[in-house]
Each structure stands twice: as structure tokens, then as C-alpha cells.
Amino acid sequence: MVGFEKIRKYIVDDEFRLIFFDNQIYIINYDKILELSDGNITVNWENKLFVIKGDVLSLKRLLDREVLISGKIKSIEVFYDK
């Protein structure tokens, strides 16, 4: 069974990732988008909130558990639930 679990982890990518590019953020395997506005986008994953602040923020791509955010990124803040 150990070999099967390694193969499953290789095929099924379920790790959370937040990748920052020049004026874009790509997020994979998030749980929920909680806020969506021109200046703030808040994404939830497990017990963490990721608050992206900027100007003219928009969703360029929205797929199941994947999102590409574009705009002038000013900050990314992480808040932990206790």
C-alpha cells in the first residue's frame, strides 16, 4: 500500500499554493473566496485567511479550486484562526 499512496500523492495534487508573479497571484487548492472587491480579495484555506490588497484587482481565471488574480498587488496578509 505504501507504493499506492506515493502514486496517489503524485497524481492528486491537493497542496495549497499561493504563487506571486509580477502583478498576478495564482492560488491553488483554496477552500473558499470570502471577499471579492476592486481593492481586497480574501481567500480561506483551512484555518487561515489570505487577504490580498491592491488596486484594480480582478479574477482573470476561476476554476474549481484554482484562481488567478490580476492587478496592482500592494500586500498579502495571512491571518490564523485560534
Image (cartoon, rainbow, N blue to C red):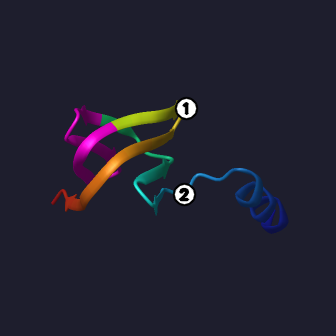
Residue underneath mark 1: 63
Task: Pinpoint residue 29: horizontal percent, then vertical percent.
Answer: 50, 47
Q: Which residues are magenta?
A: 34-57
Task: Pinpoint residue 77: horizontal percent, then vertical percent.
Answer: 22, 61
Give the prevailing secondary structure in the magenta stretch: strand
The front one of 15 and 62 is 62
User: Is 24 situated left or right of 7 in this image?
Assistant: left
Q: Is residue 20 visible?
A: yes
The front one of 16 and 56 is 56
- Is residue 52 depicted above or below 64 in this figure? below
The front one of 81 and 53 is 53
User: Is 29 situated left or right of 31 in this image?
Assistant: right
The amino acid at mark 1 is Leu
Task: Pinpoint residue 82: horizontal percent, then vertical percent.
Answer: 15, 60
Task: Pinpoint residue 4: horizontal percent, then vertical percent.
Answer: 82, 59
Tell me the residue at 30%/40% (across/down). Answer: 57
Tell me the residue at 76%/53% (across/down). Answer: 11
CA separation in Å, label 1 and label 2:
16 Å
Q: Earlier in the sequence, mark 1 or mark 2?
A: 2
* Quadrant location of the N terminus in the rendered image: bottom right
Residue underneath mark 2: 15
Asked whether 44 falls inside the magenta stretch, the response is yes
Give the class, few, some or many, for how many residues have Cα within 10 Å of label 2's Cα (few <14, many ≥20).
few
